[in-house]
Image (cartoon, rainbow, N blue to C red):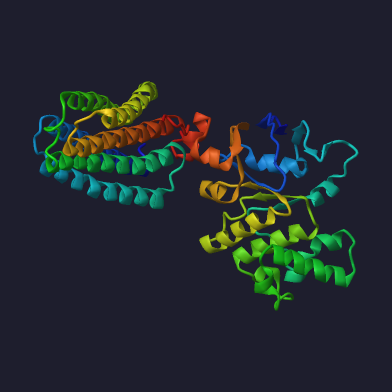
């Protein structure tokens, strides 16, 4: 027999999964916009605002379930993790908007040398892979999939620092390129951090183990 | 430890240590043996006809079931509070509180007065009854009667207090008062509480034991049991997915 709590948990899961899809879309659109020098800031901003509202809704729903049913064990771990994951999705949206905004404001990478473009494209690929994995693993609670991503997160961090070092040493980079590319790689690095938080939450939901994957 | 009622084995081999000055909650579905377990801990189980206990209960390293041990002395060291408040109906609040001491032969009025006040204070009842000590114990509310029974158990200065569903007949406010007193009392006593109410176990206990069909399934810190139980059976029970 279905418990009264189960219906609420199903609703909460649906809300969080939808947020995941929207958040992934926002990141993908903003990165494509940056790499193709297209203005996507309005579209991404709209998704980002929806995600902000959804975070509040998830929090309210989670509070209501806690107050009504006093969940424990795996039920409590799911609710607690969903609240955190909703915030991580909100941050995906916000950083995606930041990328598209900066890209438009400083005319993207148009004044950058080819190597900057290629570097950010490579980093973006890794980050998008992490975003997609974080969302898929949240649906499947696949702990093995999550653990495989640890190296990718480290790779993104290394790329971020390497990029900054390279940028500082390279002569003739325009101010526009320096500002926009630095901010974009910083936002990518932050998105990867949030993807890691989500994957840590997946391990916690599935096993009760509190791990640090960074 | 194993325990039987006639041929029916209700405890099938329990091995468990209760940490000192901590609250340990024992939970499990009806018939799992939790009440029998605590009744074995102060040798009340053996008072039931056909009841049998096998094994040892060690208190300060001494088996309380060894032939040299006086069960009455054990019951003074390990007090008990029952599911239903049971003040002696013909006695006043004061007389109820010191009933155990009087049975033990204490007659000094000053001592009895001091013990009564101290015990009622520890049970968080003193402020509510200090001007009515001569009033009958059964004239108190249900929650106050239960706290009177706790005071009565405390008066003989036990080391351990066993509580068998002490709040099952009480409203939420009376329950909260008993729970607050349990948390305070652990500073001086070791408390073992049987409860059906999982939220109560989560609120008041430091350790939780989960029993099922006469077996101990899981024993761990309460936070671990309620956040990340190791046994699937525990998980199912506490999340209401049982059966």
Residue at 69%, 43% in the rendered image = B38
Q: Where, by quadrant of the figure, is residue A75 drawn?
A: top left
B192 and B1: which one is in front? Answer: B192
- Residue A211 in the image: x percent, y percent? 46, 31
B94 and A21: which one is in front? Answer: A21
Q: Where, by quadrant of the figure, is residue A30 drawn?
A: top left
Looking at the image, residue B55 lies above or below residue B182 = above
Residue at 46%, 33% in the rendered image = B243
B81 and A15: which one is in front? Answer: A15
Q: Left or right: B174 with respect to B36?
A: left
Q: Left or right: B97 with respect to A102?
A: right
Q: Quadrant of the C terminus of chain A?
A: top left
A101 and B20: which one is in front? Answer: A101
- Residue A175 in the image: x percent, y percent? 19, 39
Can you see residue A194? yes
Q: Quadrant of the N terminus of chain A?
A: top left
Can you see residue B48? no
- Residue B102 in the image: x percent, y percent? 85, 63
Residue at 81%, 41% in the rendered image = B60
Residue at 61%, 50% in the rendered image = B165
Q: Left or right: A5 with respect to B38?
A: left
- Residue A209 in the image: x percent, y percent? 48, 32
């Amino acid at each position: 027999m279905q418990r009264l709590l189960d219906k609420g948990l199903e609703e909460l899961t649906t809300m969080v999964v939808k947020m995941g899809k929207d958040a992934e879309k926002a990141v993908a659109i903003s990165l494509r916009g940056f790499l193709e020098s297209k203005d996507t800031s309005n579209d991404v901003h709209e998704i980002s605002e929806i995600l902000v509202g959804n975070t509040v809704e998830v929090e309210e729903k989670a509070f209501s379930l806690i107050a009504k049913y006093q969940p424990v064990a795996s039920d409590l771990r799911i609710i607690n993790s969903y609240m955190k994951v909703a915030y991580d999705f909100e941050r995906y949206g916000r950083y995606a908007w930041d990328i598209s905004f900066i890209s438009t404001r400083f005319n993207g990478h148009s004044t950058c040398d080819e190597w900057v473009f290629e570097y950010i494209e490579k980093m973006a690929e890794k980050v998008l892979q992490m975003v997609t994995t974080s969302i898929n693993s949240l649906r499947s609670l696949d702990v093995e999939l999550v653990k495989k991503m640890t190296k990718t997160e480290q790779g993104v961090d290394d790329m971020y620092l390497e990029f900054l070092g390279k940028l500082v040493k390279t002569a003739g980079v325009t101010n526009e390129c320096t500002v926009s590319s630095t901010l974009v790689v910083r936002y990518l690095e932050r998105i990867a951090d949030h993807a890691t938080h989500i994957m840590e939450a997946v391990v916690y939901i599935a096993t009760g183990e509190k791990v640090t994957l960074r | 430890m194993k325990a039987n009622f006639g041929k029916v084995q209700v405890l099938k081999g329990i091995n468990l240590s209760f940490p000192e000055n901590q609250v340990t909650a024992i939970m499990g579905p009806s018939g799992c043996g939790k009440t029998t377990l605590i009744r074995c801990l102060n040798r009340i189980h053996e008072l039931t006809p056909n009841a049998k206990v096998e094994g040892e209960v060690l208190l300060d390293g001494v088996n309380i079931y060894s032939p040299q041990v006086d069960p009455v002395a054990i019951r003074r060291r390990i007090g008990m509070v029952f599911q239903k408040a049971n003040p002696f109906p013909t006695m006043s609040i004061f007389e109820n509180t010191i009933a155990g001491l009087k049975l033990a032969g204490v007659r000094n009025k000053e001592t009895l007065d001091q013990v009564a006040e101290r015990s009622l204070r520890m049970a968080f009842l003193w402020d509510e009854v200090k001007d009515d000590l001569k009033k009958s114990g059964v004239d108190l509310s249900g929650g106050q009667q239960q706290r009177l029974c706790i005071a009565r158990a405390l008066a003989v200065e036990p080391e351990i207090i066993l509580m068998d569903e002490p709040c099952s007949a009480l409203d939420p406010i009376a329950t909260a008062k008993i729970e607050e007193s349990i948390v305070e009392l652990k500073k001086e006593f070791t408390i073992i509480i049987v409860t059906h109410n999982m939220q109560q176990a989560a609120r008041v206990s430091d350790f939780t034991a989960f029993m099922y069909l006469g077996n101990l399934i899981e024993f761990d810190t309460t936070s671990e049991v309620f956040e990340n139980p190791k046994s699937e059976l525990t998980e199912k029970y506490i999340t209401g997915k049982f059966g």
